[in-house]
Image: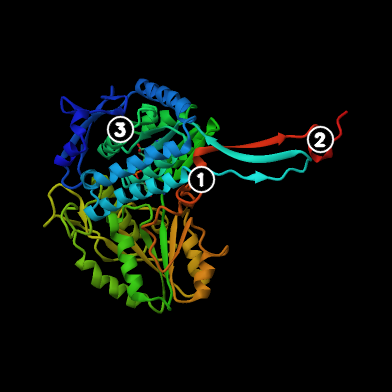
Amino acid sequence: LSFLSTLGMDALKSNGVFASVASANGHAQGEGEVFSVASPINGETVAQLRNASTEQLEQVVADASEAFRVLRTIPAPKRGELVRRIGNLAREYKEALAAVITLESGKITQEALGEVQEWIDVCDFAVGLSRQLHGLSIVSERPGHRMMEQWQPLGPVAVISAFNFPMAVWSWNAMLAFVCGDPIVWKPSEKTPLCALACQMIVDKALATMPEMPKALSQVIIGGRDLGQAICEDKRFPLVSATGSTAMGRSVAQTVGARLGRSLLELGGNNAMIVSPTADLDLAQRAIVFSAVGTAGQRCTTLRRLIAHESIVEDLVARLLKSYPSLRIGDPSVQGTLIGPLIDESSFNRMQHALAAARAQGGEVIYGGERIEQNVPAGGFYVRPAIVRIAHDAPVVHEETFAPILYVLTYSSVEEAIEINNEVPQGLSSAIFTESMREAELFMSAAGSDCGIANVNIGTSGAEIGGAFGGEKETGGGRESGSDAWKNYMRRTTNTINYGGELPLAQGIVFE
Ligand code: NAD
């Protein structure tokens, strides 16, 4: 675990217990229950922490509110300079940061490095953005008047995140929020607190080089669902950005909505790929394998439903049955491993329940699904990814099971395939493999995929940071990362300026 020392994390530990409240102002252990973090690699305890109390949250929110008063007046390009330094440090410590991701989430090294790269990329994006927080200039209907729109900092933003992207999701939010002038309070998943503390160490290092910045612009607070709920109730957060299951998002939306706050939700997906009879099957096969088994099926964009045309389904399935056995499953920190462990035993149990339900609903498990205990570290939950032939309307196919299960469904017309794509409650990512321009355009049209992401000849997972990321329906409707997602972190003001000597009223109203 020398990478923890490389990141300076020994300073966060006292009597063997890590801090649960951390910022450049200092750190403190939580005042609540002690809990252990186990590595999914082998089930061994890697850290002990205590849940932070609501009194500790109170102090954190007070500090964030104070930091906001300073941060909002610092010019955005200056705030961008902080993000530039954070990005440079993330480059410098990339391997150590990736090692923490692998340790806590079980992600293979290549994908963990990719996750840190995503953080670096979003830093670059945010630095450019810090000089482009443009508003509009609008013509006025009144003589001697001018109208404009300005984007102003919003206030302290809470980020609640999931275990499977323990750094990237925070970085999409935090790097944009910092340039927009908002402090961040981050409650990471209770399964990946060390990742959050490692990110905080990087931000602290950058802040140490810019003493004019308020130290409490970035804070981490560790706790479970109760702490998440207390955050949602706190009116001092104008925005709560929450990533996780649909059940969690529903609770967050109701709590934040009840106080008329804003929530930005990134929830579960049930992503499909249509493979047309015209598709390049070599490309499709590679895309299916990465999207379906990458991150052991624990990405929100994981391919869960393969909608194959009835004329090519047998060929496609035969290809998958050939490639799946060659996928190397095991210790995610070993070079060459492609599939690491599930996050924990309850995740494994949920996978087994889903497979049993699929069988009971008329499906046939044609490959995998079982636990592997040979040639893998003992104590981890390693599984052979499953392939299941089943009807598109079986109830289990409409649920997100956060594990590597690929349901193979068939269709006869492209219109039917699009209906199958859209018939689930979730609406995150989707893809079509086709060489037909007509099919590709239909899939991306108003009558096509209803998802936030609709790809052509690329898999469902592995988005770039330049686009807005998120989805519709039970995925929550939020958009993060690129494009104009920054507008979530700002408030818009409309200004009308009268530079004339008269006071004409809008709509020509006479009031005298
Ligand atoms: P989870 O819902 O169990 O937990 C996510 C976070 O929410 C944790 O920090 C947890 O403590 C907190 N939380 C739980 N209940 C809460 C409540 N009532 N109020 C406030 N906070 C609460 O999710 P998980 O198992 O960590 O992650 C897997 C899920 O996340 C999957 O459904 C996956 O699709 C989704 N996900 C979505 C995206 C996306 O961008 N759409 C990205 C990553 C993960």
Residue shown at the point (45%, 25%) measured from the top left: 65
- In the rendered structure, are the residues bearing label 3 and label 1 in contact, judged by CB atoms less than 8 Å apart? no
Quadrant in the rendering for residue 364? bottom left
Which kind of residue does numbered mark 3 sit on? Asp
- Residue 504's mark? 2
Query: Does any portion of residue 105 appear in the rendered image?
Result: no
222 lies left or right of 394:
left
> Residue at image x 18%, y 60%?
336
Residue behind label 2 places its C-beta within 8 angstroms of ligand 1: no
- Above-or-below relation of 20 to 85: above
Residue 127 left/right relative to 373? right
Mark drawn on residue 204: 3
Along the viewing direction, whichever of 170 and 139 lies nearer the viewer: 139
Q: Split into 4 quadrants, where in the image is the C terminus? A: top right
Q: In the rendering, at what x and y percent does residue 287 appear?
A: 34, 66
View quadrant of ligand 1: top left
